[in-house]
Amino acid sequence: MERSERAQVLIEALPYIRRFADKVVVVKYGGNALAGSASAEDALELFAADIVLMRLVGMRPVVVHGGGPQISDLMRRLGIETEFRNGLRVTDAATVDVVRMVLIGQVNPQLVAAINTHGPYAVGVSGEDAGLIRASERDPDLGFVGDVESINPTILVGLLDDEFIPVVATIGTDASGQAYNINADTVAGAIAEALDAEKLIYLTDIEGLRRDATDPATLIRQTTASELDELMADGTIAGGMIPKVESCVHAVRHGVRRAHILDGRVPHVLLHELFTDAGIGTMVTERGLS
Amino acid sequence: MERSERAQVLIEALPYIRRFADKVVVVKYGGNALAGSASAEDALELFAADIVLMRLVGMRPVVVHGGGPQISDLMRRLGIETEFRNGLRVTDAATVDVVRMVLIGQVNPQLVAAINTHGPYAVGVSGEDAGLIRASERDPDLGFVGDVESINPTILVGLLDDEFIPVVATIGTDASGQAYNINADTVAGAIAEALDAEKLIYLTDIEGLRRDATDPATLIRQTTASELDELMADGTIAGGMIPKVESCVHAVRHGVRRAHILDGRVPHVLLHELFTDAGIGTMVTERGLS
Amino acid sequence: MERSERAQVLIEALPYIRRFADKVVVVKYGGNALAGSASAEDALELFAADIVLMRLVGMRPVVVHGGGPQISDLMRRLGIETEFRNGLRVTDAATVDVVRMVLIGQVNPQLVAAINTHGPYAVGVSGEDAGLIRASERDPDLGFVGDVESINPTILVGLLDDEFIPVVATIGTDASGQAYNINADTVAGAIAEALDAEKLIYLTDIEGLRRDATDPATLIRQTTASELDELMADGTIAGGMIPKVESCVHAVRHGVRRAHILDGRVPHVLLHELFTDAGIGTMVTERGLS
Amino acid sequence: MERSERAQVLIEALPYIRRFADKVVVVKYGGNALAGSASAEDALELFAADIVLMRLVGMRPVVVHGGGPQISDLMRRLGIETEFRNGLRVTDAATVDVVRMVLIGQVNPQLVAAINTHGPYAVGVSGEDAGLIRASERDPDLGFVGDVESINPTILVGLLDDEFIPVVATIGTDASGQAYNINADTVAGAIAEALDAEKLIYLTDIEGLRRDATDPATLIRQTTASELDELMADGTIAGGMIPKVESCVHAVRHGVRRAHILDGRVPHVLLHELFTDAGIGTMVTERGLS
Amino acid sequence: MERSERAQVLIEALPYIRRFADKVVVVKYGGNALAGSASAEDALELFAADIVLMRLVGMRPVVVHGGGPQISDLMRRLGIETEFRNGLRVTDAATVDVVRMVLIGQVNPQLVAAINTHGPYAVGVSGEDAGLIRASERDPDLGFVGDVESINPTILVGLLDDEFIPVVATIGTDASGQAYNINADTVAGAIAEALDAEKLIYLTDIEGLRRDATDPATLIRQTTASELDELMADGTIAGGMIPKVESCVHAVRHGVRRAHILDGRVPHVLLHELFTDAGIGTMVTERGLS
Amino acid sequence: MERSERAQVLIEALPYIRRFADKVVVVKYGGNALAGSASAEDALELFAADIVLMRLVGMRPVVVHGGGPQISDLMRRLGIETEFRNGLRVTDAATVDVVRMVLIGQVNPQLVAAINTHGPYAVGVSGEDAGLIRASERDPDLGFVGDVESINPTILVGLLDDEFIPVVATIGTDASGQAYNINADTVAGAIAEALDAEKLIYLTDIEGLRRDATDPATLIRQTTASELDELMADGTIAGGMIPKVESCVHAVRHGVRRAHILDGRVPHVLLHELFTDAGIGTMVTERGLS
C-alpha cells in the first residue's frame, strides 16, 4: 500500500477515536474461537491486537469470555459424565470444579497472554475476585448453575483507572464462597450496565440477527429493544441467541448506549465496527436512531 | 473466657498492630494444605481468617501459593505421564497447561473464595497478569521450567493501594507469552523483595530449621543469612528446603527485614508470630539482632 | 492464657473490626475519672489503650471531655467563691478563666499524654480552635455559660483524615472571642452529629439507664428515642443524666446510628461494647431494631 | 488619609507579598505582652491582626509563645514556693502542672481567640500534641526542665497545608508522657529549622542587639552568625538574650534564611519588617549579604 | 507617609481580603485606555499593578478586553474602508482579520506584558483557544459579527487553578473555525456567569450611571436589575452603555453576586472598590441589599 | 480500499502508538505553508489533522511556529521600510509591533482554529505568556532582535497535563516586558529541551539535508551531532538551515532523543515519520544508532 493511503486510513480513524475516547467497551469473546485449531490461534492474535489498539487510542475495553467447548473437552478427558435434566446440563461439584479450572485456569490466561505479548496490559479477573459477580442458585435440580444477583465493579473500575485491560472469567460465588457456573453472555451485559458502558459487543459465529432465520437477505442492520422483544416473543430469535439478545435489550434499556452482535469470524471485525461507518452485524439501541 | 481476659488479649496485640501498620507481609502458603482432606479445609479457613485479620488491622498481606499435590493429582487423572531427567520433572506443553490450570484455576480461586467469605478483599493474580512474573527457560531439557527473570510489581502495588489482598499463582511468562512453571518459594522471595516487604513468611509442614536435621532439640529459633549459607554449604539444610532457605537468605540481603519459616500445621500460627513475642519457628535476619 | 485462646479472641474480633472500619466513634470521657486517685490514673491508662486500639484497627475515634471535679478543685485552691442563682453556678470572668485553664491546660493534656505514650496519635483541640464550637450566652444571669450554637467540624475532619485522634476540650466562643463554659455531654452529641458518627458513647459512673431508678433489675439494655422522651417526661430520668440522654435522643434522630451509655468504671468497657456482642450498658437507636 | 495614598500603600506592598508567598515565618511572641495590662490587650489585638494579614496575603505564619509572667502569677496565687538551685528555678511536679496549665490553658487560648476574631484561622497546639516536641531532662536537680531532643513537625505541616495558623505552647514530653518546661525561644528556633522557615522572628522588649550594651547608638542592624558567636563569647550578649541569639545563630546555619530580633512594643512591627525596606531591629543571616 | 500609617492601611484591607479570598472577579478593561498616549501607558501600569495585587492577596481575577480604537487605527493605516449598514459596521473577511490581529496580537500582549513585569502571572487567551467562545452569526448583512452562543470555561478554570491570570481577547469562532468579532462587554458578562464570579467590573470612561443623563448629581450609587430594566426601557440608558448594562443585569440574575460600572480614569479605582467601603461608581445587585 | 486493508493499517500503527505514548513531540511548523495560497490552506488542514491524531493516540504534541512571509506582507501593506545592517534586518519598535501582531494575532490563531475544527484541543500561547520565553538583546544595532535566554515551561506543562495542544508564537520578552523577535527554529529546540521531548521535528520545504548541497542523491537519512558539526564547519550546511541544524545538534546533546528535518510539502509527512519505519527526511541522534 502507498504511504499516502496509510496516512489516509489513520486520518479517517480520527473522528472514531475522538468519539470513543475514555469510553468503556465491553466485548464478549466466544469460547469457540479459543478451542484449539491453528486458525483459532490466529484469530486470538488478531483479537488481541484489536483490543490493544482500542486501549492505546484511549478506549477502556473490558473482555468477557466463556469457554463451553474447552469445558466439554476437559470433562471428556476426565471421564466425567454430564447429566441432563429437561435438556439442561446439571452442574455438580465435580463439574463446577472443571468449569472453574477451565475458565480461570485455561481460557482466561490464554487471552491474557495473547494480549500481553503487546505489553503488560491485561489482567485476568474472575467473578470471585473482590466480590465481582455475586451469584444465586437458579434451580436446585441443576446444581451449581447460577444467575447474576449483583455486580460489584470496584475491581474493574480500579483496573481501568490504572489503564489495565480486565479479562473476566464468568464464575460467580454466593455468600458462602461456593462457585457457580454462569452464562457468560449474561455476565457481559450485566458488567456493561454496571460500568455504564458505551458499547456492549458480542463476537459470535453468525453474521448478525435475521428477521427470517432462514433468509440471509433479512439480516438486521439496526434494531431496537422493542423490536427484539417481539422477535423473541414470536420465536424468530431462539436458542443460544436468547441470552445474548436478552442481554442486549436489557443493557440498552439500562444505560448502555449501543449493543452489537458481530461476526467474530471476520478478521478485525472490532476495528471495522469501531473505526468505520460500515454497517457490520446487528446494532441495537434503546429506541430508533433519529 | 472472661470478658476481661478477652479485652486483655486485644490490648496486648496493640504494640504488634502498631509495629506492622502499612507494612507488606508476603506469606507463602503451601499447596499441601489445600490438597483436599477435611482438615485441610479447616486449615484453609483458619488461614483465611488470619490473613483477613492482618489486613483489617492495617497490614498489607500478599499471599503466594504453589500447588504440587493438586498438579500431580490432575496429571494422574488425565493420564499424563511425567518424565524425569536427572531427577527433575520435565514440563512439556501438556504439563504446563495442567500446571497453569491447577494453579490459576483451582488452587488460587480456593484461596480467594476462602478469604472472600469475610468480604470482597482477595483478588487472584497470576504471574501472567500485567507482566508480573517474567520468566526465562532454565534448561532446554526440562521444557517449560522457568526461573524468575524479573518481577513487575505494578499490579500488586495497585491492588494493595486499593486495599485488596493479592493472591498470587506462580506462573511466569517469557516475552512470547509462553507460560512457565516456576518454583513458588522462589517467587515468594522475589515478590517480597520487589515490594520491599517487612516480612517474608513460609508456611511449611516442619516446625522450623534444625542445626541437626535429626535432632528436634536443635530447632533454630533465630539465625542469620551467613549461618544459613554455611548450613546449606555443609549439607545440613538440603532438599525441598533449599529454595525456601535460599529465598530467605536472598530476601534479607535485599531489603526484607525478616524472613520466617513457620509450621503451617499449627492453627493460627501467623497470629502467634505476628501478635505475640512467642518464638515460633525459625526467624532469619541479615545480621544478628542487637 | 493459651496461645490458641489468644488467637481465638483476635479472630472473634474480626467481624466487629470490619463493621466499624473508617467509622467515627465519639466517646465522652467523664471528668471524674481523671480527678486524681491512683486508680484514676490506671483507669486513664486503660482508656487510652482502648482508644488507641480503636484507631489502630481502623476506627476514627474522637474523645470529648469535661472536667467538673478538677475545676472545683482549682477554684477552691484559688479561693474563688462560686455563686449560685436558682441552683445554677454563675460563671463570671474569673471562673471562665479557671474553667478554660483546667479543661484546656490540665485535663486535655493529661488525656493527650496518656494516649501518646502509644505513639504520636492524639492532638488536643479546644472549641476555640478553628472556630470548632460557636457558643451563645444561655442567660445573662449565669454569666459565661454557653449553649452550642453551631459546630464547625473542619479541624476535626482534617485531623481524622490525617489519622490523628482529636481530644476535645469543651470550651466555646462567641463571635467576639469571649470564651464560654459549655456542657460537655451536649458538645459530645453535637460533634457526633456534625461528624455523622456511627456511634456516640457516654462513659459514666452508672451501669446504664433504668426504667425504675431505684431498681437495678430494671436496667435498660436497648431503647429508642421515643421511649427516652417518655422517661424524661415522666421524671424517671432526671438530674445529671438529662444532658446525656437528651443528646442521645437528638443524635440518633440526626443521623448518628447508635448512642450508648456505658459504665466507665468497668475496665476496657469500650472494647466490650465494640468487639463483642455482649449487651453492655444502655443502647439507644432512633427506632427499635428490626 | 486620601484614597490615592491608601492605594499607593497597598501597591507598594506588592513586591513583599510576592517575595514571601507560601513561605513559613515563625514568630516567637513574648509572654510579657500578654500579662494583662490594658495596653497588653491592645498589643495582642495588633499582633493578631498582623498574623492574620500575613496569612491572608499568602505566608504561612507559625506563632510560638511562652508565658513567664503568667506562670509566676499563678504560682503566687496558688501559694507555690519556687525553689532555686544555682540561680535556676526548680520545676517540680506541682510547678510543671502550673506551667502546663498556664501555657496551654491560658496564654495559648488567648492568642488563638485574638486571632480567631478575624475568622477560623488559629489552632492551638502544644508540644504534647502528635509528639511535636520530644524533650529530655536537662539536669536531675532542676526537675522537669527539658531540652528539645527532637521536633516532629507532622502536625504543624498538616495544619499549614490546611491553611490554619498554628499557635504553639512550648511544653515537651519524654517517651513516658511526662511533661517538661522548655525554653520557648529555643523551641521557636527548632521549629523554624524543622519547617525550613524563611524567617524566624523574635518579638522582644528591646530595640535590637547592640555592639555596646550601654550605647543605643551601637544598635546592630544586620549581622552574621559568626559575629554573634563572638559577641556571645566576649560577653557583649548575655543573660536572657542568649537563648534567642543562640537560636538565631543555629537556625540560620541550618537552613532558615533570616532571623530577626524585633521590638515587639512597636505597633505592627511585623508589618514594618515584612512589608517595607525599613531597617527594623536586628537581622541575622548566615553570612554577610552580598 | 509614616510607617504607622502604612501599617494601618494594610490592616484596614484585612476584611476585604478575607471577603474576596478565592473569589473570581471578572474585569472588563476598555480599549480606550490602551490607545497609545503617554498617560495611557501609565494607566496600563496602574491597572496591571491592581490586577497583580488582587491575585497576590488571593482573588482570582480574569481580565477581558476589546480594542475598538486600535482596530480603527489599523484599518485606517491599511486603507480598509468600513462599510456601514443601518448604522452598523459590516465586518467582512479583511476586517475580521484586522480585528483578530489587533485584539489577539496587539492589545492582548500589551496587557499580558504589563502584568508580567511583576512576575509570570498573566496568560493571554483568545476565544478561539480550547473552544472558549462559541459564536454564531448575528445577521448575514453584517458579515462576521457574532453573538455569544456558549462559553466553555475549561481553559479559564485550568489557568485559574494553576494560579495564572487569564487575559481574554474577545474573538469567537463557529463550528467551522471561522472567527467572529464579538462585543467585549457581552463576553465579559458571559464569562462572569460561566465562572460563577463574585464580581463583574466594567472599567469605563464615565463616573457611573445616572438617573438623568445630563445631571451629574443623579449618579446612581446602587441599583437593581429591575431598575436598570426600566432605565433602559425609558431610554435613560442608551447607546454604548447598553451592552454593559444588559450584561450587568443578566449576570446578577444568573449567579454573579455584584456588577459594577467604575470610572477607569481614576487611578487604582479597582483597589478603591475592592479594599474600601467607599462608594465608587455604580453597583448592581439582583435585588436591593437588605 | 478494502476493509481488511484499513484494519491492517491501523494494526500496523500499534507498535508506534505504544512507543510514543505520553511522549512530548515538538513540531516546528514553517510560516511558508501558511502564507495564503489555496494549497497552503489544504496543507494546514492536513497538518492540523496529523497533530490531532498524534494527541488522540496519546502523544503530547507541541506546535511552534514563525511567520516570516506574513510579517513581510504586513510590513509592505503598512508601508514600513525595512532597514538592513550588515545584511541583517533591523527590528525597530514599529517592526516588533508588526511581528507580534502577525505571529500572535494572525498565524497563531490560524493554526489554533485549524486544529480546533476537530474539537477544543489547541490553545495559543505566546512567549510572553507566563514568562515562557525570556529574551535578551542580541546586538544593539539590530534593535529588538532577541536570543533565547531561558525557557519557563510551566504554562506548557500545565496545558499538556490538561491534555491541550499548545501552539507557540515565538515572541520573547525581557524583564521590562519589552517584546523581541526571536528565531522560531531556535525556540523550537529550546522548548524541546525544556520539555525533555522525545522528538523535535522541523517541517521544512526541502527533502532533507544533503552531504553535497547540489546532489539530491546525497540526501542524509541518518546522522549524528558530530557529523552535523562538521558539515556546518565546512560550509556544506549554510544559510537558513543553520538555526535548524544547530538546534537539532544542541537538542540531541541535551536530552531530546531524536531530531528530524522533514519535507513539510509531503502530505501527512508527520504520520509517515511517526507511524511507519519508512526513512523520511533526515534523522539526527546524539550518537550513531547501535
Image (spheres, coloured by chain):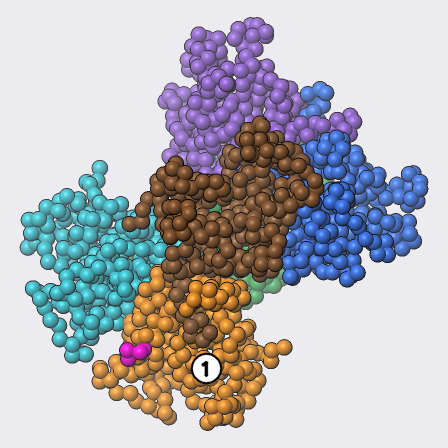
Chain colours: A blue, B brown, C orange, D cyan, E green, F purple
Return the residue nearer the eye: C224 or C17: C17
For residue A67, side relative to residue C27 (left or right): right
E96, above or below B244, in the image = above
Return the residue nearer the eye: E255 or A140: A140
Query: Which stretch is magenta?
Result: C36-40
Q: Position of residue A71 (x, y in %)?
A: 74, 45
Inspect the image, locate mark 1, and give the three-letter code of the amino acid beneath it: Lys
For the question of whether residue F11 can be seen, the reply is yes
For residue A11, side relative to residue E26 (left or right): right
Q: Disc 1 marks which residue?
A: C244
Q: Looking at this rendering, what residue extends furthest in the front direction?
A: B214
What type of secondary structure mainly makes up the magenta span? helix
The number of discs equals 1
For residue E276, side relative to residue B178 (left or right): left
Quadrant in the rendering for residue A35: top right
Quadrant in the rendering for residue C101: bottom left
Return the residue nearer the eye: B257 or E261: B257
B158, above or below E252, in the image = above
Mark 1, chain letter?
C
Q: Element type at marker 1?
A: helix
Q: Position of residue B212 (x, y in %)?
A: 38, 46
Q: Is residue D45 magenta?
A: no
C3, above or below B98, in the image = below
Residue drawn 62% across the image and 44% down it: B71
Q: Position of residue F145 (x, y in %)?
A: 43, 24
D174, above or below B93, in the image = below
Return the residue nearer the eye: C7 or E100: C7
Q: Position of residue E215 (x, y in %)?
A: 51, 58
Residue drawn 12% across the image and 65% down it: D141
Residue drawn 16% across the image and 76% down it: D80
Residue count near mark 1 (Cα–Cα under 10 Å), binned few <14, some 14–19, many ≥20: many
For the question of whether residue D17 can be seen, the reply is no
